[in-house]
Image (cartoon, rainbow, N blue to C red):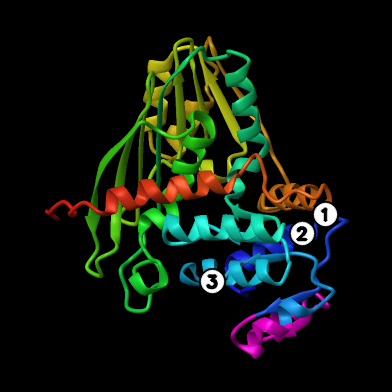
């Protein structure tokens, strides 16, 4: 469901999986549906009910604008179709809980498409932490920022379409932090409003019994887009852009890792990062395509196993991420300079 940019990337990555086939495409515009479907030898629909009733459709991927996700997910579940819902799965935590309840009652699989959790480099991070490579985790730092001009009609800034940096970008560092540390004991932070009222930049602090996470996202700058995990015996860094990381660095010196984390992404900084240093190493986790195929594999495996949720990306954590965003945006924004 949906024929935008992310739908095109997902369709391309499904081509890397021989067991996957796109049977049908839905768009509110029949012309868009037909143009997209023609590339895939798929059936085109502009009617939701007809699309969901197609017996050739065994599972549904929702890649429509943010404000449509929850309602379309509930319709797919009601039709008995396993569903993968593009991030953010919804615009409030209550809608996620409604999706989870409907999936349980109907016995249908449902998951948010937070694809970064399924990347080989992210799996490696969890394995290294579990093996004690960096000792006890004490701090996570991450920024995910890409500059976007505030222009009329931009989905990034339209409140009615679920715009804002937290929904578009913040879900990534928040979800990965919960993936590594679980839900926090306390949440604080601040946000800066765009002219449209959505958050131009959001900064989060998540407090844990023995650790803290300092996370930020924004449309006001191009960030370093790394994710750093500091431990008592070293640090791991998912190199930029961490949401589709293909390189994982280890440094026995957390302070040195923090210095590298704060450097820009220019040629000089990249060369500095690649200079061999005692106690520092980098692993490559290259993959073909865009990296969306790993979540698709996980969904297929879960559906074939008769499961209604995925342990790697449970709906409870999707709801928790939105509760964190809700708590921050419930505060007044900070004044712009």
- Residue 28: in magenta span: yes
- The mark closer to the camera, 1 or 3, is 3
Q: Distance between the residues labelled 3 and 2?
A: 25 Å
- Circle 3: is it few (<14), some (14-19), or many (20+) Cα within 10 Å? few
Provide residue 97's location: percent of width, then percent of height.
51, 55
- In the image, taking residue 323 as reference, residue 77 lies left or right, namely right
- In the image, taking residue 53 as reference, residue 125 lies left or right, namely left
Q: Distance between the residues labelled 2 and 1?
A: 5 Å
- In the image, taking residue 278 as reference, residue 26 lies left or right, namely right
Residue 71 - label: 3
Provide residue 263's location: percent of width, then percent of height.
38, 33
Provide residue 284's location: percent of width, then percent of height.
66, 31
Considering only order in the chain, which callout, 2 or 3, is on the residue closer to the N terminus? Answer: 2
Look at the image and tell me whether residue 158 can be seen: no
- Asked if the residue at tag 1 contacts the one at tag 2, i.e. Cβ–Cβ closer than 8 Å, the answer is yes
- Residue shown at the point (37%, 74%) measured from the top left: 160
The front one of 25 and 255 is: 25
Look at the image and tell me whether residue 190 can be seen: yes
Residue 17 - label: 1
- In the image, taking residue 223 as reference, residue 111 lies left or right, namely right
Q: In the structure shown, which secondary structural element does the residue marked by tag 1 occupy?
A: loop
Disc 2: which residue: 14
- Asked if the residue at tag 2 contacts the one at tag 3, i.e. Cβ–Cβ closer than 8 Å, the answer is no
- Circle 1: is it few (<14), some (14-19), or many (20+) Cα within 10 Å? few
- Circle 2: is it few (<14), some (14-19), or many (20+) Cα within 10 Å? many
Q: What stretch is highlighted in magenta?
A: 27-50
Provide residue 298's location: percent of width, then percent of height.
74, 47
Q: In which quarter of the image is residue 149?
A: bottom left
- Residue shown at the point (72%, 84%) measured from the top left: 50
| Furthest residue in direction front, as rendered | 105
Considering only order in the chain, which callout, 3 or 1, is on the residue closer to the N terminus? Answer: 1
């Amino acid at each position: 469901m949906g024929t935008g940019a992310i739908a095109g990337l997902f369709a391309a990555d499904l081509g890397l999986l021989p067991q996957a086939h796109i049977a049908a495409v839905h768009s509110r515009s029949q012309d868009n549906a037909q143009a997209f479907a023609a590339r895939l030898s798929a059936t085109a629909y502009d009617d939701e009910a007809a699309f969901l009733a197609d017996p050739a459709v065994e599972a549904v991927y929702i890649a429509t604008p943010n404000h449509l996700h929850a309602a379309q997910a509930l319709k797919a579940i009601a039709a008995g179709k396993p569903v993968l819902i593009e991030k953010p799965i919804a615009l409030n935590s209550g809608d996620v809980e409604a999706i989870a309840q409907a999936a349980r009652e109907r016995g249908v699989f449902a998951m948010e498409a937070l694809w970064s959790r399924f990347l080989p480099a992210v799996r490696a991070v969890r394995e290294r932490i579990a093996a004690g490579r960096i000792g006890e985790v004490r701090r996570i730092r991450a920024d995910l920022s890409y500059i976007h001009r505030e222009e009329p009609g931009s989905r990034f800034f339209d409140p009615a379409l679920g715009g804002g940096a937290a929904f578009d970008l913040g879900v990534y560092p928040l979800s990965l932090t919960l993936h590594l540390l679980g839900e926090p004991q306390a949440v604080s932070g601040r946000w800066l409003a765009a002219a449209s009222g959505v958050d131009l930049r959001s900064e989060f602090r998540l407090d844990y019994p023995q650790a803290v996470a300092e996370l930020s996202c924004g449309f006001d700058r191009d960030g370093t887009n790394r994710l750093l995990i500091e431990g008592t015996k070293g640090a791991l860094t998912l190199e930029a852009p961490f949401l589709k990381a293909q390189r994982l660095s280890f440094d026995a010196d957390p302070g040195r890792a923090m210095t590298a984390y704060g450097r820009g992404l220019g040629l000089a900084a990249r060369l500095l990062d690649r200079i061999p240093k005692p106690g520092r190493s980098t692993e490559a986790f290259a993959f073909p395509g865009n990296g969306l195929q790993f979540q698709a594999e996980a969904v297929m495996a879960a559906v074939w196993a008769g499961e209604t949720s995925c342990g790697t990306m449970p709906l409870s954590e999707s709801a928790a991420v939105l509760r964190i965003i809700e708590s921050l945006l419930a505060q007044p924004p900070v004044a712009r300079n």
